Image: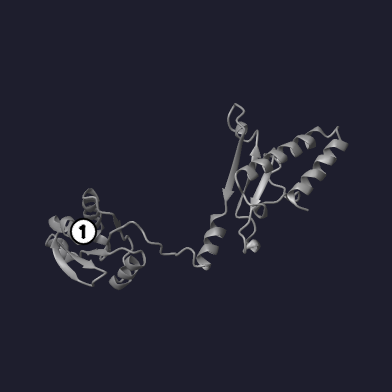
Amino acid sequence: GNVDEVLDKLKYLAQTTPEAEEFTLGVTELETVISGVRNLGVAENRFCIDLSIARGLNYYTGTVYETTLIGHEALGSICSGGRYEELVGMFLDEKMPGVGISIGLTRLISRLIKASILSTFAATPAQVMVVNMQNDLMPVYLNVSQKLRQAKINVITNFEQRPLGKQFQLAEKQGIPFCVIIGSEEAAAQKASLKDLRTREQVEVALEDLAEEIKRRLA
């Protein structure tokens, strides 16, 4: 039945079995929870009472709940939790009641990706990617990245050495407009190539001028 019908039946059982004090307390708590949910403005078709749910009987002491994704119920619960009076007390020498939840991120994210709601290459706040041409130049890349950050430029450093084209593709998928390219010759000359992925223009810049050049092009 609907929420009110189930509550009415539970309250009737509580009234007819007064010796079941814990059951009566549970029904009262459940009624309070439902009232709170409604006061929060949650639509009636978004919640129900499910008496078959059983979770963590060794530490949950009150109402427990599970959340499913509408249209993807086969995934099972994606967010679950409940009330626990004694759980924290198992680790601390004091009583500290609480309510908690856990979110099934793996299930949730995989479904969001399949539904094209979430991209595996979501845009980042980064404005520049320092690409990895040679692993032995990583100290140079880290130093350049840090100097750009100090100039208030958002930077990510690619730690994986891959073909340059692949690194450009990665930057584009993440919405990063500029790549900084430093090979052994550039490092020796204290220079870098700056590639604008929007226009495909590539220019050579002295490392000491790199931050200002990027800022000029971002303006």
Q: Position of 204 compared to 112: left or right?
A: left
Q: Which residue is mark 1?
A: 219
**Residue, x 16% and y 56% (percent of image)?**
212
Residue 61 in picture, x, y percent from top left = 69, 37
Helix, strand or loop at mark 1: loop
**Residue, x 25% and y 60% (percent of image)?**
136
Q: Position of 187 compared to 160: left or right?
A: left
Check the image and report above or below for 23 versus 102.
Answer: above
Residue 65 in picture, x, y percent from top left = 66, 47
Q: Nearer the viewer, residue 141 or 121?
A: 121
Quadrant location, the C terminus: bottom left
Check the image and report above or below for 2 versus 168.
Answer: above
Q: Nearer the viewer, residue 130 or 24?
A: 24
Q: Position of 176 compared to 88: left or right?
A: left
Residue 70 in picture, x, y percent from top left = 62, 60
Examine the image and state in which quarter residue 162 appears: bottom left
Q: Nearer the viewer, residue 45 or 10?
A: 45
Q: Nearer the viewer, residue 58 or 124?
A: 124
Residue 202 in picture, x, y percent from top left = 19, 70
Amino acid type for the residue under numbered disc 1: Ala
Examine the image and state in which quarter residue 206 appears: bottom left
**Residue, x 61% and y 59% (percent of image)?**
69
